[in-house]
Image (cartoon, rainbow, N blue to C red):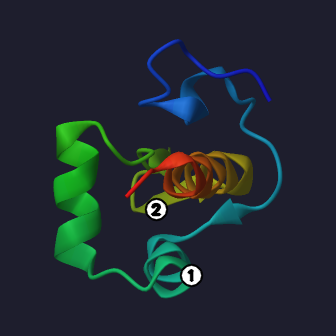
Amino acid sequence: MKTNPANQKPWIDCPPSGRLLRPQEVFDRMGLSKSLVYAMIAEGTFPPFLKVSARAAAMPEAWLESFVESRAEHALTQTN
């Protein structure tokens, strides 16, 4: 997986592949509240949802996976 230099938005270089996850599935998988996810999206620290129709939004599964991988890498490289 190719990431941008700052590794702050790893989903930018990730092709939108895999299943399209509806917002509730993203909240459930991440264990985060709806308001926190939307706040992180607004800050640019969480992958955005794509509008797939006038009343539906979804996130490519690959984007969520790249976000989780980058957070795991960051956690493993942290020194205490």
Q: Answer with left or right where residue 65 lies relative to residue 47.
A: right
Nearer to the camera, 54 or 9: 9
Q: Position of residue 55 (x, y in %)?
A: 39, 62
Q: Residue at x 18, y 40 (%)?
A: 43
Disc 2 or disc 1, which is closer to the eye? 1
Front-most of residues 1 and 25: 1
> In the image, 60: left or right of 57?
right
Q: Residue furthest front?
A: 80
Identify residue type, mark 1. Answer: Arg
**Residue 65 left/right relative to 77:** right
Q: Residue 32, position in %: x, y?
A: 34, 80
CA separation, marks 2 and 1? Answer: 19 Å
Question: Are the residues flagged by discs 2 and 1 in contact, CB closer than 8 Å?
Answer: no
Nearer-N-terminus badge (2/1)? 1
Classify mark 2: helix, strand or loop: strand
Identity of the residue drawn at 18% across and 44% down:
42
Q: Residue, x 56% and y 49% (percent of image)?
A: 67
Q: Is residue 6 above or below residue 30?
A: above
Task: Judge whether 73 appears above or below 20 on screen.
Answer: above
- Which residue has dot 1 on it? 29
Name the image quarter holding the N terminus: top right
Residue at 17%, 73% in the rendered image: 35
- Quadrant that contains the C terminus: bottom left
x%, y% of residue 65? 68, 55
**Vertical side of 80 occupied by 45: above or below:** above
Residue 61's x, y, as percent?
Answer: 70, 57
Image mark for residue 53 = none
Residue that carries the numbered disc 2 in the rendered image: 56
Which element is circle 1 on?
Answer: helix
Q: On the image, which quarter does residue 45 sit in? A: top left
Q: Nearer the viewer, residue 52 or 76?
A: 76
Q: Residue flagged by tag 2: what amino acid is it? A: Ala
